Amino acid sequence: MKRSGEESTLPSRDRFLVFGAPAIEEAEIKEVVASLESGWLGTGPKVAQFEKDFGEYKGVAHAVAVNSCTAALHLSILAAGLKPGDEVITTPMTFCATVNAIIHAGAIPILADIDPKTMNIDPAQVAGKITSKTKAILPVHFAGRPCNMDALGEIVQEYNLTLIEDCAHAIETEYKGQKAGTFGDFGCFSFYVTKNIVTGEGGMVLCRREEDAARIKMLALHGMSKDAWKRFGDEGYKHYYVLECGFKYNMMDLQGAIGIHQLQRVELYWRRRQEIWQRYNEAFAGLLIGLPAEPEHGTRHAYHLYTILIDETKAGISRDEFLGAMTANNIGVGVHYLSIPEHPYYQQAFGWKPEDYSEAMRIGRQTVSLPLSAKLTDEDVDDVIMAVKTIIE
Ligand SMILES: Cc1ncc(COP(=O)(O)O)c(C=O)c1O
């Protein structure tokens, strides 16, 4: 092991490799230009096309595009009819947006610790957190690995709960042949710049019931009546009526224009990330670091994040020193995530302590995400491997 400050800080590449940089191709650039030239920048035909294409990809009838997964989660919780004081069980190993959406909807987030192998919410921990106020479960398919949907489904059935899946990492994920986002009442997706397909900012909700999709569509545009987005179209001005106090969460056509073409390459990109994942697995097999568990039989992993664990007692370098050494080698890295109870806001608001969710705490303090984007060239992957080996060996 070489500490940062020694020769491992000499960059093996001359340009910084940005973590999670998206692959943007000519077709989406042309489509965005066509949107700009048409003058219709806001919600319009490209968003409608993207919703249709995404719904078809997932095999569902009701897909509503919004401007983020955060918005998708917020509106799903509202559409589920949760009331202030209702409890929603989720994972401490997630991005803050998952928990914030619960709070914004007026509900109370309750955390259930993760299974350390899969890093997904542990159904046994969920069962232990059920109270008479529990109304929903909000699992996150972490890194693209599906949660144990059989076990979670049993809990949902037994207690008659709403199931909202956070599929921000899980566009291509499947569990026993069923696609992520179709198990629950709502499935929420992100097309943020680092995600498996991107629209810059953007999100989508899959709804089991048509009436929920209609309500989410309305709430995403100020609570204005159906098809208000068409009011300036060539069919003539249409009055709208505000039926609820909604939000400004609609997706723009400029975003839909990117999404339509990204979605056509979703499988191509998935195969590329799978290849990179396998190269990392082979290259790091002998190192004293933790590697991601193999995908479980009968599931499809979306390969959104490749996370290694740096245990200082084994690797001889702390996680944060490792992050610094990778950056010094011109390789961008990420941390997904410090566990939710590490953040001061949640400690103050809910009294959460990291050690009460010990598996998420440990992993959050050891984890490092390596670049895993379809944009990476073979040389980029070589550079990542070389940097990790130089720092650790
Ligand atoms: C697990 C998880 N949930 C929700 C979100 C929020 O997604 P968005 O940025 O599209 O609002 C993210 C984004 O990083 C995420 O990783």
Image (cartoon, rainbow, N blue to C red):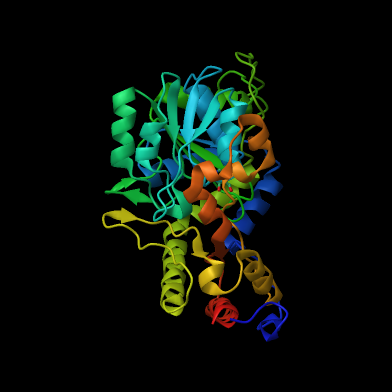
Q: Is residue 44 visible?
A: no
Residue 277 coordinates in the image, percent (x, y): 44, 69
Within the image, what quadrant is residue 377 found in?
bottom right
Q: How many marks?
A: 0
97 lies above or below 143: above
| Residue drawn at the location 52% of the way across and 41% of the way down | 356
Q: Is residue 106 visible?
A: yes
Front residue (pair 101, 378): 101
Front residue (pair 286, 201): 286
Quadrant that contains the C terminus: bottom right
Residue 41 coordinates in the image, percent (x, y): 68, 41
Quadrant that contains the N terminus: bottom right
Residue 287 coordinates in the image, percent (x, y): 47, 77
| Residue drawn at the location 52% of the way across and 39% of the way down | 204
Ligand 1 rendered quadrant: top right
Front residue (pair 290, 158): 290
228 lies above or below 138: above
Query: Which residue is outermost to the bottom?
Result: 7
346 lies above or below 339: above
| Residue drawn at the location 55% of the way across and 24% of the way down | 107
192 lies above or below 382: above
Residue 380 coordinates in the image, percent (x, y): 58, 77
Within the image, what quadrant is residue 118 found in?
bottom left
